[in-house]
Image (cartoon, rainbow, N blue to C red):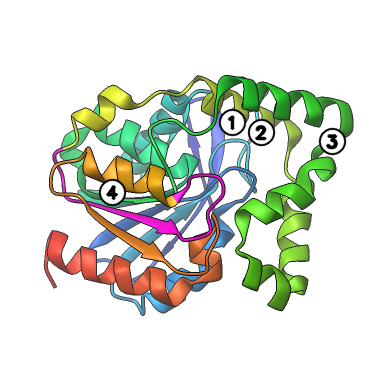
């Protein structure tokens, strides 16, 4: 485990891979932490130098009281990359992680060589949806939303065939720092990256699980059509957490994109 102090908080991170390999940053989704990428990182087979980290409010990173913003998360990422002297990189973000990646690119375009936008959009959910979720958590706790969230996170086959794993991921959500979860709910409530999307000029791959009920395939496909030259690929029989359900398929798509984006 490694930790770095950036302005106002401590972030937990892990770097895997050879120093000279092409650089890749993995940004996870709401209610999870950097462990959602573990199987994917193995499937990448050491081709890249990979940075996984827990965003503010998640895992072993600090969880200050909210509300947070997508800008807060992007500033955290950029500060961490600066402290690690992490040069030009590809950002791969899932859900809120994809929004953070887009915001980071908009703020510091020279740092980003390409984007992988997985199960994400320029807006996710409505303000009313996030206000309702935040109210439910404040009154009943994170455990109250675990079961319906699992139906969004995972496809029907995975839930049926991997019940033990689903239970473990449900535990992760239920035990997440409440301040951190609420803080990032507020970030999603307020986020609108429409203008940032219109300014993207780097290579982009958009990925989506075919059964994603949070950011549906039509929504992610629409995002891809708005970015010049962006590719869209769908991962079958997967829900929102595509790298957890289908790490091999996700890795294959990511490796192919990296080879085109930055060369072998």
Give percent across and percent down for residue 88: 20, 49
Q: Are marks 3 and 2 in contact (CB under 8 Å)?
A: no
Looking at the rendering, the stretch of residues picked out in magenta corresponds to 201-216
Residue at numbered disc 3: 141
Give percent across and percent down for residue 192: 40, 23
C-alpha gap between disc 2 and disc 1: 6 Å
In this view, the mark in front (3 or 2): 3
> Disc 3 on helix, strand or loop?
loop
Examine the rendering and report whether any part of residue 21 can be seen: no
- Residue visible at 79% across and 40% down? 142
Left or right of 208 in this view: 211:
right
Q: Are marks 3 and 1 in contact (CB under 8 Å)?
A: no
C-alpha gap between disc 4 and disc 1: 25 Å
The part of the image, by quadrant, that contains residue 100 is top left
Q: Earlier in the sequence, mark 4 or mark 1?
A: 4
Residue at numbered disc 4: 86
The numbered mark at residue 184 is: 1
Q: Nearer the viewer, residue 238 or 166?
A: 238
> Disc 4 on helix, strand or loop?
loop
Q: Are marks 2 and 1 in contact (CB under 8 Å)?
A: yes
C-alpha gap between disc 3 and disc 4: 38 Å
In this view, the mark in front (4 or 2): 2
- Residue visible at 69% across and 68% down? 159
Left or right of 17 in this view: 231:
left
């Amino acid at each position: 485990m490694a930790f770095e102090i950036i302005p106002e908080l401590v972030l937990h991170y892990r770097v895997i891979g050879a120093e000279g390999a092409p650089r890749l940053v993995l940004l996870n989704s709401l209610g999870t932490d950097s462990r959602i990428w573990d199987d994917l990182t193995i499937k990448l087979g050491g081709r890249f130098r990979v940075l996984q980290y827990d965003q503010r409010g998640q895992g072993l990173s600090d969880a200050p009281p909210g509300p947070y913003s997508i800008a807060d998360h992007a500033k955290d990422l950029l500060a961490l990359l600066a402290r690690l002297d992490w040069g030009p990189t590809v950002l791969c973000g899932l859900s809120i992680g994809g929004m953070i990646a887009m915001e980071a690119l908009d703020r510091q375009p020279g740092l980003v060589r390409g984007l992988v936008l997985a199960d994400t959009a320029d807006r996710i959910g409505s303000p009313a949806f996030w206000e309702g979720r935040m109210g439910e958590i404040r009154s009943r706790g994170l455990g109250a939303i675990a079961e319906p969230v699992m139906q969004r996170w995972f496809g029907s086959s995975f839930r049926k065939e991997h019940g033990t794993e689903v239970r473990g991921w449900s535990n992760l959500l239920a035990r997440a720092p409440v301040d951190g979860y609420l803080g990032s709910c507020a970030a999603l409530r307020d986020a609108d990256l429409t203008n940032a999307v219109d300014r993207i000029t780097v290579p982009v791959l958009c990925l989506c699980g075919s059964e994603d009920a949070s950011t549906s395939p039509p929504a992610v496909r629409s995002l891809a059509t708005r970015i010049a030259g962006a590719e869209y690929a769908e991962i079958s029989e997967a829900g929102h957490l595509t790298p957890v359900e289908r790490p091999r398929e996700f890795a294959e798509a990511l490796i192919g994109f990296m080879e085109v984006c930055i060369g072998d």
